[in-house]
């Protein structure tokens, strides 16, 4: 094997399968691949962020709808209407659903104290 003495020698040395040397062209190609991979990663992360926002909105909407239903059922009962066992059962079911949803969403951390 020819001993390489200068950077020019490295530039001209072809990459051989299992060989210890790479050319600047090889490095440039690898750099382009790395940059492309980073661009793909950035695109993927933005897609995930969009999906997280969608999930948060869906959960918020569901929480709001359940809260509204609970308020309406409690108002009916508080107004003195005869609450049938079905209405009371519906209220309990909605409260259970709301609590289950609340349990799946971690509580916000407390604000830092100074």
Image (cartoon, helix red, strand yellow):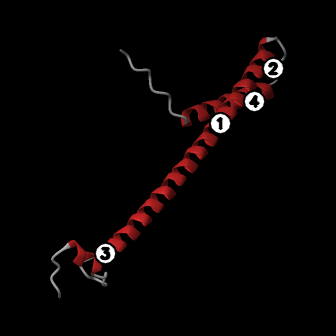
**CB atoms of marks 4 and 1 within 8 Å:** no
Separation (CA) of disc 4 from disc 2: 10 Å
Separation (CA) of disc 2 from disc 3: 82 Å
* Residue 84 placement (x, y as % from top left): 82, 23
**SS state under label 1:** helix
The residue indicated by pointer 1 is 57
The residue indicated by pointer 4 is 90
Image quadrant containing the C terminus: top left
Report the residue at 81% width, 17% height from top.
Answer: 76
Does 15 sit left or right of 5 as displayed? right
Separation (CA) of disc 4 from disc 3: 73 Å
**SS state under label 3:** loop
Indicate the quadrant where residue 9 lies: bottom left
Outermost residue to the right: 81
Report the residue at 55% width, 44% height from top.
Answer: 49
Q: Which mark is residue 79?
A: none
**Mark positioned earlier in the residue sequence (4 or 3):** 3
Report the residue at 28% width, 80% height from top.
Answer: 12
**Mark positioned earlier in the residue sequence (2 or 3):** 3
* Residue 71 placement (x, y as % from top left): 73, 20
């Amino acid at each position: 094997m020819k001993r390489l003495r200068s950077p020019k020698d490295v530039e001209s040395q072809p990459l051989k399968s299992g060989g210890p040397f790479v050319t600047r062209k090889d490095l440039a190609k690898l750099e382009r691949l790395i940059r492309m991979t980073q661009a793909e990663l950035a695109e993927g992360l933005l897609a995930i962020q969009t999906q997280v926002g969608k999930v948060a909105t869906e959960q918020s909407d569901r929480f709001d709808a359940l809260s509204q239903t609970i308020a309406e059922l409690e108002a009916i009962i508080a107004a003195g209407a005869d609450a049938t066992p079905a209405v009371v059962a519906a209220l309990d079911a909605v409260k259970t659903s709301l609590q289950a949803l609340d349990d799946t969403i971690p509580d916000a951390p407390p604000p830092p104290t100074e």
